[in-house]
Each structure stands twice: as structure tokens, then as C-alpha cells.
Image (cartoon, rainbow, N blue to C red):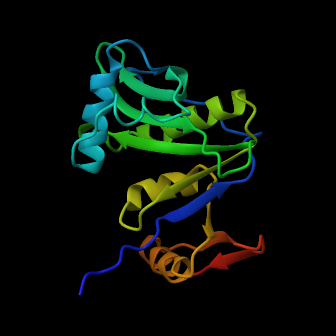
Amino acid sequence: MEQQQQPQLLMVREDLGMLPDLVLPEGYVEHSLRPGDEDGWEHIITASFGGEHRFDKGIAADDPYKPERVRFISMENGGPVATASAWYRPQWKENTGYLHMVGLLPEHAGKKLGYAVSLAALHYMAREGRTRAVLHTDDFRIPAIKTYLNLGFIPELADDSHLDRWIALAGQLNRVIPAVQGNGTRTEIKP
């Protein structure tokens, strides 16, 4: 019998008004898409997610695409090493940004660059007038989930499977995780 795929986890950050300043390690710079960065995006996303990812058929073909929404962290004297997109999805309210396609080259892990590039995307959302942000992620993306929690995102229990999955994640992370139920009620998920 074929196993049915579970829906992705949903996380929300309700307020983009008080974002921390973007601080990068020495030797790195943050920027939006520049000519030639498309290959860097493909390399980062393929390294992060596997499979084949084409910039022109993926991100650039999506209706919300604007080059300035695709954020990068690059080495000062080199190419892109991390990316995140400050996206918009019509199913969310107009004031809601969608953190999309966050990736990091593995050889640059451990420098908080995933946090930094995601924060850069959130700053861009705020500049566009968005006041909140959402994202989807998967249970096995533990480093990404830690990053999102550190950025102030909390789980939204939007599917019947989410609570049990977040309880398991709270145990893996050994921490209490604030969450919001689909009806807006706040709760805490304990390990």
C-alpha cells in the first residue's frame, strides 16, 4: 500500500514590525538577484533540496516573481551561498508575506547564514508593507525549523496531523514550542 504524503507544516510570524537588524559574518554580503545569480540559485536549491531546480521554470515563472524579492548572501569575493525569497501567495491575506525557497550551501553551514538570509527576506517583506509572514516546512528539516523558531515563527496547527508531529519535534528539540491552533487560540507544545 502506498504511503500518503502528509501536508507540510505551517509556521507563522504575526508581526514583522520589530525585526532584528541583519548582521552578517565577516566576508559575506546580502543583496537581491543580480545578473548571473540564477546559476547560483539553482546550485544552492539543488544542494539544499536535491533533484533539479531551474530558476527560469521555477521561481522566475511564478506570478509573484520580482528580482528584488529573491534575496542572497554571497561571499564578498565570490558567488551566492544562501538564498530566500520574500514571496506572496494569494491565498494569504494581502498583508502576509510567504518565506519561500530557503537554501544554503552545506559548506557554509554553522555560520547562521540561513537565519540571516531568511531575515533579509522578512525585512524585504516589511518594506513591501507586509505585516506578517508564513512558511511551509517539513518535519525532517530540523536545522531550518530551529532557524524559523529563532526568527519568531511559531507552528500553526492547520492540519489534524500537525499536533502529533510538533510534539515529536518538541521532543527532538528538547524545548517547549509556542503554537497557535487553526482557530487562533494560543497553546504550548511540550516535549
Percent of width and height locating residue 97: 64, 42
Where is residue 74 drawn, in percent x and y?
A: 37, 23
Percent from the top left, x then y, of residue 120?
Answer: 56, 32
Q: Residue at x 28, y 39 (%)?
A: 53
Of the 4 image quadrants, the one containing the N terminus is bottom left
Q: Nearer the viewer, residue 121 or 112?
A: 121
Q: Is residue 91 above or below residue 27?
A: below
Q: Residue furthest toward the bottom? A: 1
Q: Nearer the viewer, residue 75 or 14?
A: 14
* Residue found at x 54% / y 29%: 23
- 46 to 10, vertically: above or below: above
**Picture layout, residue 52 above or below residue 69:** below
Q: Residue at x 75, y 32 (%)?
A: 129
The image quarter containing residue 21 is top right
Q: How many marks?
A: 0
Relative placement, left or right, of 148 versus 41 is right
Find residue 121 and report its image quarter. Answer: top right
Q: Position of residue 152 (x, y in %)?
A: 64, 53
Q: Is residue 21 visible?
A: no
The answer to whether residue 42 is left or right of residue 102 is: left
User: Quick check: 6 above or below 135?
Assistant: below
> Quick check: can you spot residue 9?
yes
